Image (tube, rainbow, N blue to C red):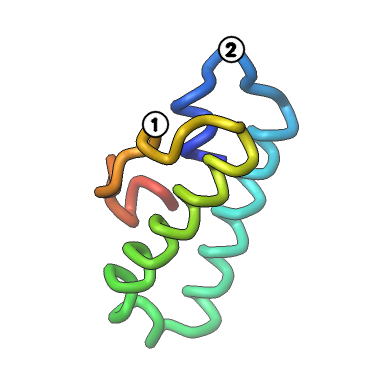
């Protein structure tokens, strides 16, 4: 939803905002419960970004190129 949030500011909704907040809470909980995951964060984030790009393009109907290949923010900013 962060990618859609940036690409479609006119379509931002309470649902998107809630989805982003819920995902951030789930990530924080997962990292608290499994601190060893923090060491693999960068690689996981890169993989998740690639998946999120494809998903955002599919869900919005926008071209894949609309969404940057490289993350626009760090894993910390996404949290």
Along the line of sight, the residue nearer the viewer: 42 or 27? 42
**Where the N terminus falls, by quadrant?**
top right
Label 1: which residue? 66
Label 2 environment density (alpha carbons within 10 Å; few <14, some 14–19, many ≥20): few
Residue at left offset 53%, top offset 40%: 57
Instruction: Classify mark 1: helix, strand or loop.
Output: helix
Image location (x, y in percent) of residue 45 = 36, 64
In the displayed structure, 60 sits above or below 21; it is: above
Residue at left offset 28%, top offset 68%: 42
Residue at left offset 31%, top offset 79%: 40
In the displayed structure, 20 sits above or below 28; it is: above
Along the line of sight, the residue nearer the viewer: 65 or 53? 65
- Answer with mark 1 or mark 2, whichever residue precedes in sequence: 2
Label 2: which residue? 10
In the displayed structure, 67 sits above or below 23; it is: above
Image location (x, y in percent) of residue 41 = 33, 71
Tag in front: 1 or 2: 1
The answer to whether the residue labelled 1 contacts the one labelled 2, judged by CB atoms less than 8 Å apart, is no
């Amino acid at each position: 939803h962060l990618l859609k949030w940036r690409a479609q500011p006119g379509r931002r909704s309470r649902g998107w905002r809630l989805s982003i907040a819920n995902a951030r809470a789930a990530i924080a909980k997962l990292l608290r419960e499994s601190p060893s995951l923090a060491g693999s964060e960068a690689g996981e984030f890169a993989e998740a970004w690639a998946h999120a790009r494809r998903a955002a393009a599919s869900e919005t109907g926008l071209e894949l190129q609309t969404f940057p290949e490289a993350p626009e923010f760090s894993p910390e900013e996404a949290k």
